[in-house]
Image (tube, grey):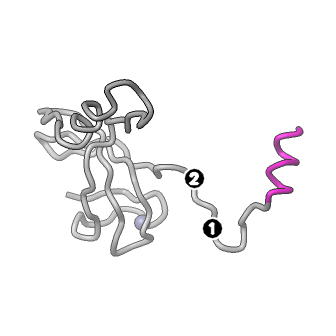
Amino acid sequence: MRIACPYCGDRDQGEFVYLGDATVQRPDPAGQDAALAFQDYVYLRENPAGWHREYWYHEHGCRSWLVVERNTVTHEIRSASLCRPVQMPGTMQTDSDTEAEAGQ
Ligand SMILES: [Zn+2]
């Protein structure tokens, strides 16, 4: 299986580490029944046959966290994207940059 990393390009699966289901949402710890919600969050997972969104980590590459859409039956990959945009060194935004953007 090959995964197309947005930074590194098409790479062998051996460079990546599977990190789990990307469809589950962390429950609110202050919510009602938080303990039960966290039990479900930690222990209960779907085992779909077909398309699934998963977290993969490019450990032996750019070390980015990716969300990969993969067919669990055929291992076909439909998309691979960054979990969120990453600021590269030398392009870090300052608080004043953020405030200026918010004011626009
Ligand atoms: Zn990469």
Amino acid type at circle 2 is Pro
Horizontal side of residue 41 vs 100, given as left or right:
left
As drawn, the residue found furthest toward the top would be 32
Q: Nearer the viewer, residue 77 or 39?
A: 39
Q: Is residue 60 above or below residue 68?
A: below
- At a point 63% along the width and 67% down the height, the residue shown is 88
Quadrant of the rendered structure where residue 72 is? top left
- At a point 32% along the width and 50% down the height, the residue shown is 55
Is 98 colored magenta in this rendering?
yes
Is 57 colored magenta in this rendering?
no
Amino acid type at circle 1 is Met
Quadrant of the rendered structure where residue 40 is? top left
Instruction: Tell which quarter ligand 1 is in.
Output: bottom left
Quadrant of the rendered structure where residue 54 is? top left
Image coordinates of residue 101 in percent, x first then y, are 83, 45
Residue ID for mark 2:
85
- At a point 18% along the width and 37% down the height, the residue shown is 45
- At label 1, counting other C-alpha atoms closer than 10 Å, the crowd grade (few under 14, some 14-19, many 20 or more) is few
**Label 1 beta carbon less than 8 Å to ligand 1:** no
- At a point 40% along the width and 53% down the height, the residue shown is 66
Image coordinates of residue 1 in percent, x first then y, are 19, 57
Q: Nearer the viewer, residue 37 or 32?
A: 32
The image quadrant where one finds the C terminus is top right
- At label 2, counting other C-alpha atoms closer than 10 Å, the crowd grade (few under 14, some 14-19, many 20 or more) is few
Q: Which residues are the magenta region?
A: 95-104
Residue ID for mark 1:
88
Image coordinates of residue 9 in percent, x first then y, are 41, 63
Q: Nearer the viewer, residue 19 or 66?
A: 19
